[in-house]
Image (cartoon, rainbow, N blue to C red):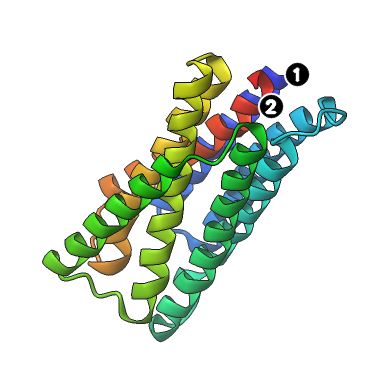
Amino acid sequence: MIYVLLGVASIFAVLYIFVELTRKPLEAFAYKALASLSFIALAAFVVIDKVMIPSLYGWFLLGLVLGLIGDLILALRPLNKPEDDKTIINYGITFFGAGHIMYIIGTIVESAFYWQSLLIGSIMAGLIVLGSIVLKFQMGKSRIPSYLYAFLIFVMIGQTIMMGNIHGLQTGYLLLIIGAILFGISDLILAPIYFQGMNKKILIALNLVTYYGAQILIALSLFYL
């Protein structure tokens, strides 16, 4: 069953990416909801199967649900006025940031909190601040929320890397690390799309492929942990 759900999640992700690249906002919104619901279904199957084990499963499922909400909020951007763009982005950042907090809590429950993850988060957030200044990102009121979000996502990535280092790169931890890193890559690609107006289809495709790859792998990792 897990592999059927994995196949469904992958198919819906591909369908959504295709529709998004055709620039049909209303259809894209519907397919995005289906794509995001499918990776939640993948995680929910594992959580239900392992419900008696008090560990990271519930926290990660909450993170995925918050990701779904963030997805749907950001999908509203093309349907609203340009002056509402940064407000919508900030709401999306809020839900995705909360999702990363759930992921971080899940890694702590599963393993421990590692101070190295704070170091990774601080260094990467600092580099992103510097990069946004050098590249002259037009961030407006999204500047501070974006910097805080960058810190959170790289703390999360640091946590998964440290877990793999401590517990060994068994399948579950390896999938989780790859998923977390893909999440970071997807957001790095998203930054120039949102804040430099670089709406090239290749960038949008790369952002979506890495994002859905990330969420699907994070969901799938629960099956092996």
Q: Which image quadrant is residue 190 in?
A: bottom left
Q: Residues within 10 Å of mark 2 (few under 14, many from 20)?
A: some
Q: Which residue is mark 2?
A: 5
Vertical position of residue 145 compared to residue 125: above or below: below
Which quadrant: the N terminus?
top right
Horizontal relation, residue 37 to residue 173: left or right: right
Horizontal relation, residue 128 to residue 97: left or right: left
Vertical position of residue 207 compared to residue 190: above or below: above
Q: In the image as oriented, which residue stretches furthest toward the bottom? A: 83
Q: Is residue 206 visible?
A: yes
Horizontal relation, residue 61 to residue 129: left or right: right
**Image disc number at residue 1:** 1
Provide the secondary structure element on which disc 2 rests: helix
- In contact (CB < 8 Å): disc 1 and disc 2: yes
**Image disc number at residue 74:** none
Which amino acid is tagged 1?
Met
Q: Residue at x 74, y 34 (%)?
A: 55
Q: Residue at x 44, y 48 (%)?
A: 155
Q: Residue at x 45, y 31 (%)?
A: 162
Image coordinates for residue 77, horizontal then vertical, percent = 47, 70
